[in-house]
Image (spheres, helix red, strand yellow):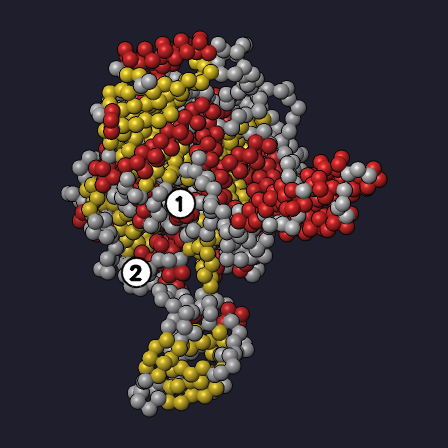
Amino acid sequence: VSPDASATGGTVASAGGEHLDDLHTLGSRALDEVAAAADLGALEEVRNRYLGRGDGLISARLRGIGQIPDEAARRQVGKTLGELRSRVDDALEERRRDLERAAEAARMGAEAIDLTRPAPPLRRGHLHPVTRCAREIRRIFGHLGYTAVGGPEVEYDRYNFELVNMPPGHPSRDVQETFWIDDARLLRTHTTPVQIRSMLEMGAPLRIIVPGKTFRRDYDATHFPMFHQVEGLCVDEGIALSDLKGTLEYFARSMFGPDRAIRLRPHHFAYTEPSLEVDVSCMVCGGSGCATCRQSGWIEILGSGMVHPNVLRNGGVDPDRYSGFAFGMGIERIAQLAYGIEDGRPLFENDVRFIRQ
Amino acid sequence: VRISLRWLRDYAALDAPLSTLVQALVDTGTEVDDVHRDAEGAVVARVLALTPVPKSKRGVRIADIDAGGAEPVRLLTGAPNVGAGDLVVWAPPGTRLPGWDQPVGTRVMFGMASPGFLCSAVELGLGDDADGLLLLERGLPGQPAGEVLDLDAVLEVEVTPNRPDCLCHVGIARELSAALGEPLNEPPAVVPEALSSVSPAGSRVGVRVEDPQGCPRFMARIIEDVAIGPSPEWMQRRLRAAGLNPINTVVDVTNFVMLELGQPLHAFDLDRFRQATPGGGAAAQVVVRRARAGERIVDLGGREHQLQEHDLVVCAGTRPVSVAGVIGGDDTGVVPGTRTVLLEAATWDGPSIRATSRRILAKPTDASMRFSRGLSDTLPPAAIDRAAALIAELGAGRVLRGAVDEHRGALPPIPPIVVPDGRLEEILGCPVDPSEAATALARLGFSVEQEGGRLRVAPPHFRRDVRIPVDVAEEVGRSLGYARVPSTLPGRRRPVGELAPHPPVEERVRDVLVGAGLDEAITYSFISPAAAARLGGAGERRSPIPLRNPLKEEWSVMRTSLLPGLCGALELNLNQGLGDVSLFEIGRAYWEGERTAPPPGSTPDGADAALPPLPEEPLLLGLVSQSGDGRADTVAGRIRHLQSVLAFAGHDLAGVDMTIEPDEIPGLRPGRSGRIVAGGRRVGVIGELDPDVLEGFELRGRVAAAELRLDGLVPEVPRTPHFRQPPRHPAVVLDLSVTVPAEARVGSALEIATEAAGSLLETVEVLDEYRGGATGARKSWTFRLTFRVPDRTLNRNEAQARHEAVAAALETRLGAEVRR
């Protein structure tokens, strides 16, 4: 039982006689108890004990002030009690906030997560490298105003060979070993037949690229019986070989980096004249010679040339008015060079560990 | 073809370093695939000491040599002509010597290892002296032998199909001499009078060409008193350098001339030829014609060939004895006892030779490879005279006077090409000095007349590929070098025409699928017939198109569906220990007889109408998802996932709702398969692979699969979304629980509910399904119906009325009982 229990009970009796000193003792005891309250429950008990509406040690004394007869004493006690109440009230409030902050801190501590643990992987799929590369090629030529078009993969001999200047028995057919369906139909060996179809369909002037599947009857460490090409065709008035060179230089530098240079090497394709192979300076050694470029500093990336007048004519385009250039590149080869794929064999195995890189 | 550097130097100086020569060839359009230097790796060595091997009866000695290394090398030598202090050539292990198939190795003799050996002149390809070591006049130990000796080098040259003239040493020498500005000395081709016989060739052989188109020219010479023996060492060395094995004088001379001038020759034994002639007379009767069906020839290698009517043959009288331009016959060839030779030099129709050679031989012969490309009919006289002269000079026979020359099918002359002033610049895009162009052309053998800026160009006989001004531009361009052509971009002012293109359908679909967690596969367009039959996918019940010449059975028919290929990809991953793999592929399949219109850009002449139509090539999307745990609900979840992906793609890309119509589909499990319906059309199939199909593809676990046709479904021009303000008025949400017969399907219930609810219904969804327990053979569903009108707050009673209408419709049409 608190020593004040009697005082609480005997308010009237003690009202006038209580010393201010006692009030100060009461106040410091209240503040000590506030400071000692360990949690919000204990704090509430302290509040009730001192400031409780009915019988709080301070509240009750305040209520009993009127009974102090001496006015000066009454005023003095009233002032002291009022100050005491505010101080205790402030202390309670401050202690409450401290306790809440501590509780919050404890809760946060319990909810802490270990951010050093690797996050679970986002389940997103990956594009095949051939698709990625084809998109990149399409993007680059898109900037130059080329539209992507398609054509049949099962073609007629006429479009695949005859109309691109390779009549039956032509020796150039030997470098494109062909899968046949019957005497007239084959699996296209290149995307070049789409040159004819596009010219017939759209006429000149024309700027197209043709990404698509092609097939040759070759199968070894570096040849697949199915592969992908991008054909390009630009037909307009006044197109010269320098335009071919500039366009392919733009392509090579966009694809392989701004420091790349290109080199045109004479070659032969039945459907272009002059015909050229295009080399890019080696992206591995920069041109000084390494294993990738077989010490030459150059890597062949595509075949190209000025469209043969017969091909223009077969496409319904007047070779006396228009000229053009064309090129064809193997997407697998470009992808291998651009993405550092040393061995091309996994390309069509579809091992997800390969694709998900 | 293989080109020997030393041989080339017979026709031009070409004393520049080898790398310069190679670069000159590459820069002018002749690719050099490889360069082999003779005795590469061999070094100069000084003999320090020689010690006899006591056990050797042939005087083998131990040689200690200084080969430039820190330590002397000890090896054995049997050569008598070497002494201490001599400079010799040491071929260490790994050195490749001319004419040797294997690199030099380390031998063990007399109980010691002898690394490589010391070389004689013949081993280095430097003459005939095999008796002792080649002793050097100069050199430092360790110096590459090639720096002190004139060793040969062989270039492996890739000649483009338009340049048969470059398939020989004179041709390559011509290219090099033109590139380097050196004079070219062509070999002489005159048979010295002193070595000729007086009797004319015509008295011994008659030639009749029945098909001058197939054989524009046939020349024959007769050589008598032939002595068959080995050809001289220098000739053998050249043949070996070029990759041919020496056989005997006559055959070696024909091969030598082919490798020199590019004109293949054939030598018959005249006596055997006459014996092979049915009812043969005194003079051999050479008849050139197309073969008749059923005729056969046994070739020099003893293989019998069945001839067809377009094959060209050389006959002894009526009997074919040689497959013209391809391979000679067995019973008329030159043999050790041959006394009289009939030498043939002919020009054949390239396409005919190509067709025959490709049909009867796995690989073309040296002759058919050259004839296929179309040789000049001006070559045979020079070649046959060169061969006859060589045989005579080697003392291997006496050449009869003159040649029989049947040249009725003479090829039309190549007309001169007029290149107008400025035309070369138009084509190449850089200024070209006409005089410079004329000089470059003249070096390549063209006759050029220059009139101001205009050139009149007459190609040489061996350049039948040069016909029109662009051909001349190529010759000029490659001679002057494309490095001088500037880089420009084409550009002209023209009115705005085409609009910016949209990303293609397949690219948009790919983005959705990758976002949904599937990896992209690309599989072969040809599959095995068994795989095609096992799983038809969206191409079900279609017969695949067979390839006439597949590489193997596994790749012998064109796919009608992408799913078999995708199953193969799953199998590969499973074999790598990778389960739980989800793949998609977008690509074409091939459906015979279903193309409704010819592809765009067909020739206006209608020539395709006479041909079998091209197959339809639908653009398909195939999806497979393997689950390893074998549980029914796991794979059901995979099917659901594929359904979600397709629904999203359908909504986002095509603006259509995709629904599934349950059905039995070959290759898919009954009860877990259906057809994909979009916009009222069946566009594909979805379900779980049948256990038999899994077994057929050697797949473990269970696999969800779907395939649908994209073209015609997803619009080429992307759908433009319309963004509307979201509804501001509150919705009334009411749930409805029913029990239904076990076989009832949610799809029908949703249809019925949507119809009965009318226009107030915003959405209806299934919250849950419960089966078994108290409901017995029935199952229960809870639907959540959301009612809303755009322009006002919906009265709850109105919604309640529609809710009851839905309940009533489900009761009458689906046998549902409402649970209250």
Distance from label 1 to label 2 (Cα)? Answer: 60 Å
Q: Is residue A199 left or right of residue A157?
A: right
| Percent position of residue B512, x then y | 46, 32
For the point 50% across and 51% down, the residue is A117
At mark 1, the secondary structure is helix
**The image quarter in which residue A188 lies:** top left
Of residues B668 and A36, the one nearer the viewer is A36
Of residues B497 and A79, the one nearer the viewer is A79
Of residues B405 and B241, the one nearer the viewer is B241
Q: Is residue A138 left or right of residue B312?
A: right
At mark 2, the secondary structure is loop
| Percent position of residue B529, x then y | 24, 36
- Would you name the residue on which mark 1 appears? A352
Q: Chain of mark 2?
A: B
Numbered label tally? 2
For the point 48% across and 33% down, the residue is B511
Disc 2 packing (10 Å; few <14; some 14–19; many ≥20) = some
- Would you name the residue on which mark 2 appears? B248
For the point 57% across and 60% down, the residue is B16
Establish whether labels 1 and 2 are both on one chain: no
**The image quarter in which residue A234 lies:** top right
Q: Is residue B652 left or right of residue B643?
A: right
Disc 1 packing (10 Å; few <14; some 14–19; many ≥20) = many
Quadrant location of the C terminus of chain B in the rendered image? top left
For the point 63% across and 43% down, the residue is A49
Tags 1 and 2 touching, CB below 8 Å: no
| Percent position of residue A216, x then y | 37, 40
